[in-house]
Amino acid sequence: MVTQQLIEPTTTRPTLARITGACGLTTLALVLGASLANDYQGIPFTADADETVSTGADATQEQPVQASITTPNAGAVAIRLIEPFGAPPAGFRLLGNEIRIEAPEATPGDPLVISFLLDASAVPAGETHETIELFRDGGLVPACTDAPDAVPDPCVSARVLLGDGDVSITALSSHASAWYLAAPDNVPPQTSITSGPKGETADRTPRFRFKSSEVPATFDCRVDGGNWKPCASPYTTKRLSYGRHRFEVAATDQAMNEDATAAKRRFRVVR
């Protein structure tokens, strides 16, 4: 069992603390300054064989994902938690940061052991450690069939629901790369218009503000039944003729679920 020690950060750049437990297990823990809450810089550290490098022992609402890696081979190890790039696979919602890891190559027979800790605040309602999925390089990581070997490579060897509601997922892999956690999401967002003309207006280029029940989201707008086009709030229409008009906006969430009902606002431009 590892004996943890509290080390107060004295710099805004990460430092390294070696924590040795009673059984001789050594963990390299990154100690971070406040300015690195969402970016651990990915500074490489030289780890010994069978040593563990970790971004921290506790996930929090402010930093919902922590990661650690145990490498069977000595060499440079770096972990970087960054804002995710691009969209997740359709039907999934990203949870927390993307985790980019560098480590010496291993083999399926003697793999890297990579663990991810997700704070309970980031677990969507109705989801559990059994339904949250792990992805590497955009591909779903399946369950291991021959642990402690990485078969298939990579694979998930353990899923644990901790007493405080946090979720721990452990993977075995011959190489590190980029990882993220995601939850199934097949529920479309709800779109609402928060401001803009309603009834009569003398403004021939009215402006509308709107929002989605899910963040982040993208939007498509149209006026008077025209073609849907990408848009953002606030949205200003082109110059409209006098008379009746209809503005519509629909949100699409991170899992590519579209609001099929759309939000509508009818109004009339008067002289």
Image (cartoon, rainbow, N blue to C red):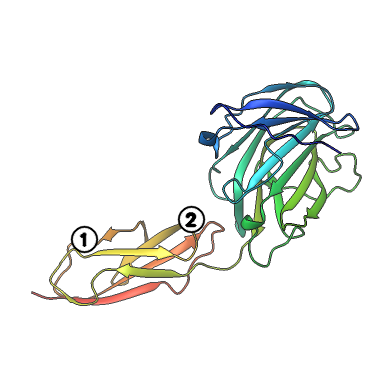
Q: Where's residue 181, x and y in %? A: 66, 49
Q: Quadrant of the C terminus?
A: bottom left
Describe residue 213's horizontal placement relative to residue 23 as left or right: left
Name the residue: 47% across, 72% down.
Answer: 260
Q: Secondary structure at mark 2?
A: loop
Q: Where's residue 91, x and y in %? A: 61, 60
Q: Nearer the viewer, residue 246 or 92?
A: 92
- Quarter occupied by residue 238: bottom left
Label 1–label 2 contact, CB within 8 A: no
| Residue type for callout 2 | Pro
178, above or below 10, in the image: below
Describe residue 42's horizontal placement relative to residue 173 as left or right: left
**Which residue is the site of mark 1?**
238
Q: Nearer the viewer, residue 110 or 230?
A: 110
Q: Secondary structure at mark 1?
A: loop
Please indicate, yes or no, whether residue 245 appears anywhere in the rendered image.
Answer: yes
Name the residue: 15% across, 70% down.
Answer: 241
Which tag, 1 or 2, sits closer to the chain's start? Answer: 2
Name the residue: 89% across, 48% down.
Answer: 145
Crowding near pointer 2: few (<14 within 10 Å), some, many (20+)? few
Q: Quadrant of the N terminus?
A: top right
- Quarter occupied by residue 154: top right
**Which residue is the site of mark 2?**
216
Taking the view exactly as shown, the residue that stands out farthest to the left is 271
Describe residue 107's horizontal placement relative to residue 220 as left or right: right
Q: Nearer the viewer, residue 121 or 19?
A: 19
Please indicate, yes or no, whether residue 228 appears anywhere in the rendered image.
Answer: no
Name the residue: 82% across, 23% down.
Answer: 73
Q: Where's residue 131, x and y in %? A: 73, 60
Q: Nearer the viewer, residue 161 or 20?
A: 20
Crowding near pointer 1: few (<14 within 10 Å), some, many (20+)? few
| Residue type for callout 1 | Lys
